[in-house]
Image (cartoon, rainbow, N blue to C red):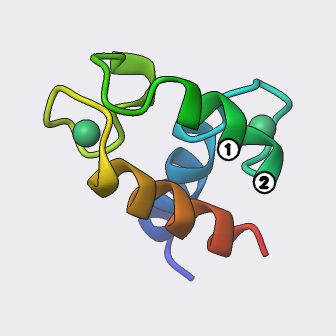
Amino acid sequence: MSVSKIATCFAAVIISDFNDDGETTIDDLPDFLSVFGKAAPRYDLDGDGTIGFGDFLKFAEALNSTG
Ligand SMILES: [Ca+2]
Ligand SMILES: [Ca+2]
C-alpha cells in the first residue's frame, strides 16, 4: 500500500470520528444523526454545506474501512 493511500484512509477515519474516541464506529452515528439536515461543517463530509445523504454514504464508507 502506498503512503498516500494510507494517508487517505487515515484522514477518512479521523474526519468521521464525531465523538473523538479515535476511530469511526457505530457509536459515531447518533452524533451524525443529531445534525442531519442542518449546516454543521464538522459533519459535512462531502463538503456541500449541509448534512445529508451524501455525508451518510461517506460515513458508511469510513465505517466499513475500519472493519
Ligand atoms: Ca468515534
Ligand atoms: Ca454534505
Number of residues whose C-alpha sits closer than 10 Å to that of mark 2, classed few (under 14), some (14–19) or many (20 or more): few
Find the distance from the CA under tag 1 to the CA under tag 2.
5 Å
Quarter holding the C terminus is bottom right
Front residue of 5/30: it is: 30
Q: Quadrant of the N terminus?
A: bottom right
Q: Amino acid at mark 1?
A: Leu
The residue at 61%/50% (across/down) is 13
Tag count: 2
Residue marked by disc 2: 26
Which label was assigned to residue 29?
1
Residue 25 at what x, y percent from top left?
A: 79, 53
x then y, percent, for residue 62 = 58, 61
Using the image, determine if residue 43 lies above or below residue 6: above
Do callouts 1 and 2 mark residues in contact (Cβ within 8 Å)? yes
Q: Position of residue 3 (x, y in %)?
A: 51, 65
Task: Classify residue 20 as left or right of residue 14.
Answer: right
Tag 1: Cα neighbours inside 10 Å, few (<14), some, or many (≥20)?
some
SS label for mark 2: helix
Q: Quadrant of ligand 2?
A: top left
Name which residue type carries label 2: Ile
Determine whether, in the image, residue 23 is placed left or right of residue 56: right
Q: Is residue 11 left or right of residue 46?
A: right
Furthest residue to the bottom? Answer: 1
